[in-house]
Amino acid sequence: MPAILAKKLGMTQLFLEDGRVERVTVLEAGPCPVTGIRTLDRDGYEAVQLAFGAVKEKHLSKPEIGHLKKADAPPMKHVVEFRDEAGELTVGETVNADTFAEGDRVKISGVSKGKGFQGTIKRHGFASGPKSHGSHNVRAPGSIGAAAYPARVFKGIRGPGQMGNKRVTQKGLEVVRVDADNNLLLVRGSVPGPRNGVVEVRTDG
């Protein structure tokens, strides 16, 4: 099962031969050198470790540089393990965009855009209050408790707070086009995270 690290470059339109328009997200996928293989006998689980995002050595610690050099990999910013995705890969190999093919179903994980502290209307879709007749309750939550009994708000009621900036996985996305020469994957629809954010791409299913 292929997996790769990618950078979200943005969204665009793709005009197909039959005249249809596809809204796609452009991902710069790889190249990702294999920097480690986890085995059931030695580590207790199976996984492959991939690196992505070339940087200068001064931005890495000595242990990070030594770990990458052991795998003959250049200095890379991101190192991620993919469970149960090792397959036939070995340390020193490189995973590229051509690992995927047009029509493949993938799931993509990334950190969503942070929206800061938000109220219940924007964060949870609560209904707004009345907007006329002198009402002062416009964007505040309405009644969220019971009556005289138990005279309190139950635990777990959704409220205002931090919105976004958390790990999100988008499933059921389709690879529309693969540009192996430029290490690009064009995926139908939107992908979690901001522009230039790093995402994890796996086969779905």
Image (cartoon, rainbow, N blue to C red):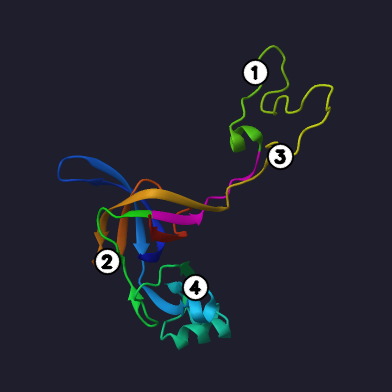
- Secondary structure under tag 1 reads loop
- Residue positioned 47% across, 72% down in the render: 46
Question: Distance of mark 1 from mark 2, alpha carbons?
Answer: 55 Å
Q: Which residues are magenta?
A: 107-118
Residue named by callout 4: 77
The mark lying in front, picked from 1 and 3, is 3
Question: Distance of mark 3 from mark 2, alpha carbons?
Answer: 46 Å
Residue named by callout 2: 98
Locate residue 157 relative to residue 126 in the image: left or right.
right
Is residue 38 visible from the viewing direction of this image?
yes
Which quarter of the rendering shows the N terminus? bottom left
Circle nearer the N terminus (4, 2): 4
Dots 3, 2 in contact, CB < 8 A: no
- Secondary structure under tag 3 reads loop
Is residue 191 visible from the viewing direction of this image?
no
- Residue positioned 67% across, 37% down in the render: 158
The mark lying in front, picked from 4 and 1, is 4
Residue named by callout 1: 131
> Is 117 contained in the magenta span?
yes
Circle nearer the N terminus (1, 2): 2
**Mark 2: which amino acid?**
Asp
Q: Is residue 183 above or below residue 173?
A: below
Question: Distance of mark 4 from mark 1, alpha carbons?
Answer: 50 Å
**Mark 1: which amino acid?**
Lys
Residue named by callout 3: 156
